[in-house]
Structure formats: structure tokens, C-alpha cells
Image (spheres, rainbow, N blue to C red):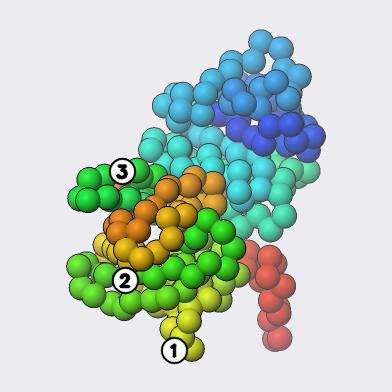
Amino acid sequence: MSKLYKTVGLIGKPNHEGASATITALYQYLDKSGYQVLIESSVAPSVDIESANIQTLTNIGELADLAIVVGGDGYMIGAARVLSCFDIGVIGVNRGNLGFLTDLSPTDFVKPLEEILSGKSHSEQRFIIEAEVYRHGKLKSCNSAVNEAVLHAGKVASMIEFEVYIDNSFMFSQRSDGLIVSTPTGSTAYSMSAGGPILTPNLNALSLIPMFPHTLTSRPIVVDGDSEIKLVLANDNHENLQVSCDGHVILTVMPGDEVIIRKSEYTLRLIHPLDHSYFNVLRNKLNWGNKLY
């Protein structure tokens, strides 16, 4: 019987003892089971595997059928921004804290992984967003985000002024510390910490969460996921402004610039065990109450 997945890429947090141990165990299991295994180049020096097939993250996206990412949600998101450009399934092994995106246990992965490799799994598509910065009508910089794009000042507690448009229709102007534009995936991350709503992953929606607005009537709002969100920076802002993508990639913004945030053409294909339940994840990670009856 032919294998559903023939080539598997292993990606992990470099110089992390736990992640290195898990990647070594995964490699031994997959190699013994007859899979071609690729090791991502940044983590390869941290693992003791002879004759490893070492590839860049981009090459893994191009060559592998399945990627296993070992780490926390932050590392998973960083890898996902690249892997979303390719037709590859992605599984997470939790070596972090909360682990909303990492389903498998690092100490008990064999049975669930065996079932996934045999096709006993289900997949879901998570959309990602792109943020573009325009200056005098010209594109200056852009990047993608799995969780959120955040407009903010470069220093703490510095008020900025901007206008928000949805599909070129004026929504509101604001004086605040910034604005979070979150995907459903990111709704349990920075957005939730800022008081934003939790969005189930199947929703085609984006949430806008003001950061410490200078009005008591400003509230988070959820808009259609296909909307184009435009932020217009007032000319009298200070120059130290930024748009952060997933808290990692920083785009410089100047007074008068326009920031366009919209859904990307790419999606992330997550692979889950058959018994995966999003609401079970929420209960476990957020310590919600269990059933009464």
C-alpha cells in the first residue's frame, strides 16, 4: 500500500534541549518506518543525526508532503508564515507553554502520529493576512501574519492618531496606543490579552481591537474576513511608528502613510488527529469548566 505522505520535514526550535530530543525521536521513528526525512537547517546543528538530509525551510515546503514543527505556538507561527506558501500539511508538537496550534505531546506522539500518517486525521485551512505600507501611493514594505498585524508606536504608551476604513468606507478615527487586526487563529493570542473576542477557526472574519483608546466608547469589532482594512496615519504623529506581524516582523511606518491589511491568497493547512476538538483545546488551555451533567 502506498504511503499517504512519503517525505516528512522536521522543523524545531534551535538550541532547545527538549525540541532537539523530540526531533531526534521523530527522526528515528520516521526513518525506521521508511519515510524520507528532511531536517530543517537551523535546527540540524542541535541534533545528533548522522547523514541527515538537511534542507532550508523553503526547500522543505517545496519537497515535503508533511511538516512536523516542534516548539511552542510562536515557533509554529514563524514556520507557518513560510509553509503557507506551499501545498504541505503541518502538524505541531508542543514544546512551549499554551500550545493552541500544537496538537501532539512530545512524550506520547507515536500512536497519534501513526494514525495521521495512515490517513486517520482531518485537516483545516487557516487563512493568513498581509500587511502593506504605502507612502505617497507607493508600496514601501509588506509581510504576512498568521495571528495578527498590529499598528503601534515604537515606544511604550505613546498615543497615535489614525483613521480606519473598511473597503474604502470610513469607519472611525482614533487616538490610542494602536490597533490589533487579528485572524481567528490569532484571536487566542495577543488579541485575547487585549480584550478581543475568541473567533472559531472556521469563521471568515477579522477582529479589530483598539489598544487603550482615548474614549470609553471604543470597542472591538468583527468584520468580514474578505474586507480590506485601511489605516491612514495622521500627519502630525511622531515618526517612530511600526506595524508588527505576529510580533516578529516589523514594518516601519511614517506619518501620512497608509497601511492596507487584507486576506492573503495563501492558507495554512493544519493536520489534526481525529479526536481533535477546538473547544476541548479551549477548555484545557484556558481552564474553562467541564460539563456539569
**What is the spatial separation of the Cα atoms under label 2 and label 3, in whole angstroms?**
19 Å
Q: Is residue 77 left or right of residue 61?
A: right
**Of callouts 3 and 1, the N-terminal one:** 3
- Please identify the residue farthest to the bottom as the structure is shown: 217
Nearer the viewer's eye, disc 2 or disc 1?
A: 2
Distance of mark 3 from mark 1, alpha carbons?
34 Å
Q: Which mark is residue 140?
A: 3
CB under 8 Å between callouts 2 and 1?
A: no
Residue pushed farthest top?
51
Q: Secondary structure at mark 1?
A: loop
Give left or right: position of 127 versus 156: left
Give the residue pinned by disc 2.
163
In the depicted structure, whether residue 40 falls above or below residue 182: above
First in sequence: mark 2 vs mark 3: 3
Q: Is residue 250 above or below residue 6?
A: below
Residue at point 46%, 28% (across, down) = 58
Residue 48 located left or right of residue 115: right
Give the residue at mark 1. Answer: 217
Q: Which quarter of the figure is the C terminus placed in?
A: bottom right
What's the amino acid at mark 2? Glu
Q: Which residue type carries mark 1?
A: Thr
SS for callout 2: strand
